[in-house]
Amino acid sequence: MNLFKCLVAFLLLTQSALLHAQSTIGGTISDSNNQPVSGATVVINAKPNVYSITNTEGAFKLENIPAGQYTLSISHLGFKPIKEDIEVRDNDLNFSFSLETDLLNLHTVIITGNFTPKDQLESSTSVSTLDAEQIQKVYPRGTANLLENIPGTFTDASAGEVFTKVYTRGISAAAEDDMGWYYVSLQEDGLPVSLVQHSYYSPDIFNRVDLTTSKVEALRGGSASITAMNAPGGVYNFISRNSSEDLNGEVQLQTGVQGEGNMLYRVDAVLGGALGNNWFFNSGGHYIHDEGARNTDFTFSKGGQFKFDLTKENSRGYFKLYGKYLNDYTNRYNGVAATNWDNPEAAYGQDFNNSALLMPSFDASIPDGRNLAEGGTNSFNPSNGVHAKDLAVGFDLFQNLGNNWSIKNNMKFSSKSANWQTAISNVFVSISDPTAYYLVSNGNPFPVGQIVFKNANSGAELARIDNSGIFSGNSSEYLTDGTLPNDAIMGTSTWYKDNTADEFMQQLTLNKTWDTHDLNFGFATGFSDTSVFTQGSFAFSTYENNPQMLQVTLENPGAPVMALSDENGVSNYGGLFFTNSRAKITQVAGFVNDHWEVSDKIQLDLGVRFESITHDGSNDRYAPFTQNGGLDQDETTAYDNNILAPTGEVDTFDYTYNYVSYSFGLNYKLTDDASLFGRLSKGNKAPELNYYFNNYANVPINQAGEVQKINQVEVGLKSILKDFSFTTTVFWSELKNIGISNFEYDGDSGRIFYTPILFNTSRTLGLEWETIYKPFQNIAFRFNGIVQDPKASTWNLYDAAGTVDTADDSTVDYSGNTLPFNPKLMFNFAIEYNRNIVSSFLKWRYTGKREANVANAFQLDAYSVFDAGLGYQINKNLSANLLMTNIFNSDGLANFMGANSFGANANGATSEFIENNPDAGFIVIPILPRATLLQLNYTF
């Protein structure tokens, strides 16, 4: 019995000793204003590592830490990291840390442009970061609008949330049509949003920024050649919130006023925390109802998204399941009419700030050329814009394998669709222009005589004209007192486009570290099964602000009334555009990269990537459907006489593009807070699907497209001083094999076509910078921008002389001219004030003068935009913010579309054309007008 008692006592004492050997480390983290810092990562290098995320009180807790010597590490975006050696004995420890501000996040670990996370100061790349606080200071007008804050990045968000343009360092030529993300990769958590691009199908359609986004990392050029899939120009990576041990979340209510009183309503929410047993979750999203920045008679945007992730952590790493569901309608703005080449002014009663010139909402049913025998139709309402849907599910894992080996694999499945129902083109077409009548049915028949225009909604007659004199050079004549606004109709088309894509993508990386080397190698794959159907019909509407749809008839005395449009004003059913194409895309890449620490001061980064991309698909050939009386066999309805339909013939294509890219970087550590870096990169860009799909003339694809070559050199300096941090980079880029083709309309034959492709070269030399100066504790100045000299070093354009006939064709040499749409100077300057519960900022964004075409015949003037914000922390959980963008309602011009005539393009406005047509009208796209937003945030 005594032996048993002694054994029990020994066990109890031993257990008590063991319990005391397991300690808890806790504490709080605050900033320089003594405000708690939530979301900071606290790590202790136990085996395995133990970490915690601070809660809204700035508190953290690390439990069950054995006795021993450790390093405690603390990091948070926007603050300098802390590393402190500690000793754990048999007692609990409690700490209080104060984080110093890292003004440009140069001590922050970045993942974009690197195969393994790197401290920004040690990285030989140009990367900028927008954290959650900076994101919240930007009016929510879409992805491109947010990226205006990144130095070296040109964005055109004048069309709205989608149909945007983003490029860097003059690498822009093929991004100027309708594929504005041609050279860069838009990513979510390290994988592309979409693998493919083609006309009206770009990644911004499927990306939305809300509270689920914690930060944006933006890589310009450089290592994008070896780290991104077919995107050598840069990477814009939207990174989601991290997991947290404590249940926490945020709800944000927003309401705004835009333009002339158009309202915006939006709600965002996010929730995350621990589920127990090392399981964590995050979920959230948003819903928006937006009347639009410009005036339309319909809701411009509505819908939202939901995102989630579920993470299991273990001693070696983590497994993460994540997903997204996007279901959203949004539209895009066309151009505005202008005159005066020297100082553009809005024309025809339009307004640079508020005119939209989009067709009003109506419901039509247009025959589907693919299924005429079955009576197939497509519903069409131009107010729908693009209905974007994206269902994505992914799996991300990271595991330490032992012996300094690790593996990371990120994969994603997605099913996307983008259904466009909108207006394409909104040019001036005089009632005396034969085009207005030819497009009814491509001249089959050509209506001559008394043309009657009625309001399609009310049926009231607006005007009656006689157009018979136009063939002898005379004008159309009004037969009654009724007239049409500006004596014109709007040259527009019902643009129906159905895009789908089922995609899989993944990147697997193996990492081995030893001595002074950090070696990464692996492979990336992507598969996309995509299709596109395009149908364009002519539509009659008035040429004015807030256009009205027109029902049009031919009413000659003694002859039957002929309907030139249906009851909605739609004419030439499916007769303007037709494409029906499909493709399977396979992308396979292998890569190897070594980060070599040559010495304490010198680090080399050497990488090479082999990529193979296969495009296997087909285009349907087509011809007008012919039948007496058209589809309905009624001789008195002309609008269904020219429906384009498949002939049964198919043009196939199957081409593979193989190329090798490389990038070499050097980082020299000047001090603990300063480094010098340089990088040489050679990248490649395989053609996108527009090369095959934009086939409006039944032309077989008999040869592969050209792979564009991108050469880049950059040298930069990064430095952190007491009150001042900066990065500055000198860069040179060269883009070769740029295939250029113009969109043309032959007024004589009514044919729409693309000119033959000519291949060109551009180069850009420039300096970009990013600085922040904080002379006082509560005041900071931010200044970033770019100075560049973009040149079209070798540049030829094909001139079709406005006709399909090649007898009068020629080429024009513009070599040595300035590259269009690239400002030589562009910057952001901001003043920020933060004190206790009050914050504010004022920002000036300057975009310099740009050439509007490669002929350098017309320039878009420089413009400035001023934004401001005011924030107030009502209590611990509740805050309010007031944002205003474009305070002074600048009407700066972002883009130029050419002459104000059907089928015109920017390159057609040559010096000769402008000299011969000094009073001609043209189309420009202004920036979006003033808007004010009130935000109310509740965090817990």
Image: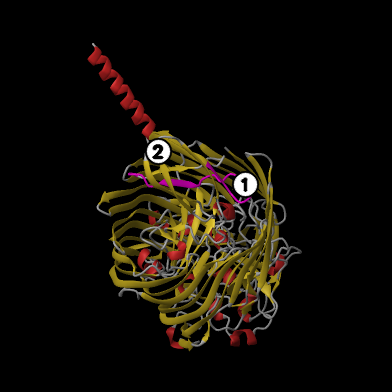
Q: Residues within 10 Å of mark 2 (few under 14, many from 20)?
A: some
Q: Residues within 10 Å of mark 1 (few under 14, many from 20)?
A: few
Which region is colored magenta?
Answer: 28-48
Vertical placement of 339 versus 331: above or below? Answer: below
Residue closer to the observer: 307 or 423: 307
Q: Quadrant of residue 454?
A: bottom right
Residue at x 62% of width, y 79% of height:
859
Q: Which residue is mark 1?
A: 34
For residue 626, say whether it is visible.
no
Q: Which residue is mark 2?
A: 89
Residue closer to the observer: 58 or 887: 58
The percent position of residue 64, horizontal first and vertical second, equals 39, 35
- Tell me the kind of residue under disc 1: Asn
The percent position of residue 235, horizontal first and vertical second, equals 44, 63
The percent position of residue 345, horizontal first and vertical second, equals 71, 73
Q: Quadrant of the N terminus?
A: top left
Residue closer to the observer: 853 or 938: 938
Q: Is residue 191 left or right of residue 291?
A: left
For residue 507, say whether it is visible.
yes
Residue 35 colored magenta?
Answer: yes
- Tell me the kind of residue under disc 2: Arg
Residue 813 colored magenta?
Answer: no
The kind of secondary structure element at disc 2 is: loop
